[in-house]
Amino acid sequence: MKEIRPHPRGRRSFLRRLALGAGAAALGPALLQACGRGPGGREGADGGGAGGGELVISNFPLYIDVNAPGAPGSVSRFQKDTGIRVRYVEDVNDVRQFFARLQPQLAAGRPLAQDLIVLTGWMAGRLIRLGWVEPLPLAEVPNARYLVPSLRKPSWDPEQRYSLPWQSGIAGIAYNIKATGRELRGVEDLFDPALKGRVSALLEMRDTMGLLMLANGQDITRPTWAAAQPSFKRLEQARKDGQIRRFTGNDYQNDLLAGNLAACIGWSGDVAQLAMEKPDLRFLVPDSGGVLWADVMLMPKGTRHRQEVARWLNWVYEPVEAARIAAAVQYISPVEGVREVLAKDPATAPLAANPLMFPDAAMQKKLHVFGPLSDQEEARWEERFAQITDG
């Protein structure tokens, strides 16, 4: 459920190292042969380069595997496999700002340039309610059968007609053990006076409030205004007291790396990637619970290239291709079989054992999806949250 994804130090080089197109060891030729798949021979693939057409995709920055020059590796391989020209644009830096750009055109019934957009689940729900997205051509996406059970039929799209997950992840507690001087155990540690002024929380309301409400024993799958009040008050007091230094998007990463932040509310994949550079970083899913979110692919109303959308969806849901993306971004892949693909290559086998990428039963019990809010409730919650974060 990510909002802002700037380019933190070293992250792009890390993605390049993992990208198959860069010649990295991850998901190398030996693994592809072991899986019985390769270029032109993947299960459910589109065949060779014959094809045509074009496709425009909007996504968050740094949310895909990349080639050595920095171009998305999956995009290059898809174009080669299908002959479809792709314009892949990393312009979804903030979902609210992106929605504000889309709104006038969609409200007027005019199609967008984009054929496919990636947004947070809750924003997807808003577009679905407004009638501004088309049903996905799922009959032409046989690989959709690989969708993991935990992400099927979400509350914002209960019939799974309009969305398929791109990636999923966890909001929890990130910390720098050199800065904290100890291991952290839960949300209470964020309010430890010893860490005053060295704590941050996320501008994504559902992630920050979700963690605090879970720590307060509330059921966030059915959020209510009354149940949220103690957490709102606690957050507000922590901001006034200076316990919380600031509220962030993805820019908490640089402060974590530098040790300016001792602890913060953060996202699982980010910390997994950053820990490759700085082993002092940790990510904790509290026993009280973490917030499970998903970013999803949507087809805006009036999309002109439905067949090309279908081929992209089918292609990225093929387990080997999905594994390449997962190895780079280290979030929870929505595709079954990815873990097995990663486990077959020594370079990526450690990722297959990572419970933040592949939650085991114990981890799954800790994860909770923030339930739906009506548009009126959304406005009320966001206004109260903004009073705190902007104060």
Image: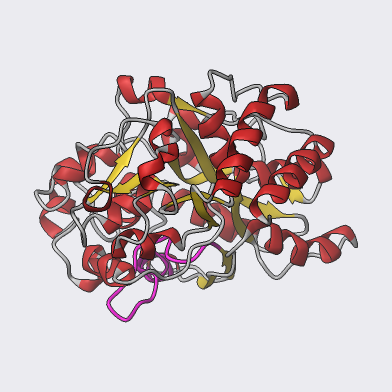
Q: Which residues are magenta?
A: 59-80
| Residue visible at 70% across and 63% down in the picture | 97
- Quarter of image, res 102: bottom right
The image shows residue 7, relative to residue 210, as above or below, that is: below
State yes or no: residue 77 in magenta. Answer: yes
The image shows residue 71, relative to residue 82, as above or below, that is: below
**Residue 42 in sight from this viewpoint:** no
**Residue 355 spot, x, y in % from top left:** 27, 34
Pick the residue in front: 221 or 391: 391
| Residue visible at 37% across and 46% down in the picture | 195
Report how many numbered discs are placed on residues in the image. Answer: 0
- Quarter of image, res 160: top right
The image shows residue 12, relative to residue 210, as above or below, that is: below
**Residue 262 spot, x, y in % from top left:** 34, 51
Which of the image's four quarters has the C terminus? Answer: bottom right
Relative to 305, 346 lies left or right: left
State yes or no: residue 85 in magenta. Answer: no
Pick the residue in front: 336 or 308: 336
Prevailing SS of the magenta stretch: loop
**Residue 275 spot, x, y in % from top left:** 24, 54
Colouring used for the render:
secondary structure
| Residue visible at 70% across and 70% down in the picture | 113
